[in-house]
Amino acid sequence: MPIDPQDTLLAVQASLAQLSSLIVSYSFSAIGAVILLVVGYLVAGLAERSIFAGLGHIHGFDATLRHFFSKIVRYAILILVVIMVLGQFGVQ
């Protein structure tokens, strides 16, 4: 039973069309996730520096606690950002 080249060509074209639509849909999700990661990383750093500086203005506040609280805020924001990025890809 010979294989018809016309049928094969149509099947390949249909597969490529489906593949291109998948690539476009996932590329928008990936670009959004990268943007979200970058913005989240910047916001986490800004929040860390702000908390560190703000606690530094309190007279007698322990330096170790300044570092601790500022890092807690930073990593809490980063964890939320990672959860949001995973949600972008459909992980729940």
Image (cartoon, rainbow, N blue to C red):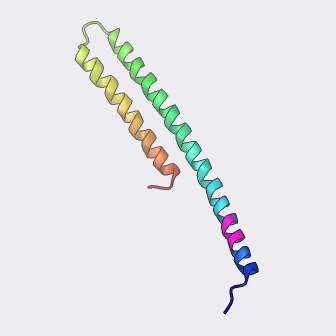
Does residue 61 lie above or below 88 as drawn? Answer: above
**Quadrant location of residue 74?**
top left
Q: Residue at x 29, y 20 (%)?
A: 67
Residue 27, given in percent of the width and then of the height, sits at: 60, 50
Q: Is residue 19 magenta?
A: no
Q: Is residue 34 above or below residue 90?
A: above
* Residue at horizontal 51 percent and vertical 33 percent from the top: 38
Pinpoint residue 87: horizontal percent, then vertical percent: 48, 50
Q: Nearer the viewer, residue 14 or 21?
A: 14
Q: Is residue 15 magenta?
A: yes
**Measured from the top left, where is residue 82 in percent x and y?**
43, 42
Q: Residue at x 67, y 59 (%)?
A: 20
| Residue at 68 percent of width and 71 percent of height | 12
Q: Left or right: 75 with respect to 14?
A: left
Q: Nearer the viewer, residue 82 or 13?
A: 13
Quadrant location of the N terminus?
A: bottom right
Q: How many marks?
A: 0
Q: Residue furthest top?
A: 59
Residue 81 vertical placement versus 48 (above, below): below
Specify the principal SS of the magenta part. helix
Q: Is residue 42 left or right of residue 5?
A: left
- Start-end of magenta stretch: 12-16
On-image quarter of the C terminus: bottom left
Above or below: residue 58 compared with residue 43: above
Task: Report the residue that reaches farthest toward the front.
Answer: 2
Q: Residue furthest right?
A: 6
What x and y, as percent, mark residue 66?
29, 18
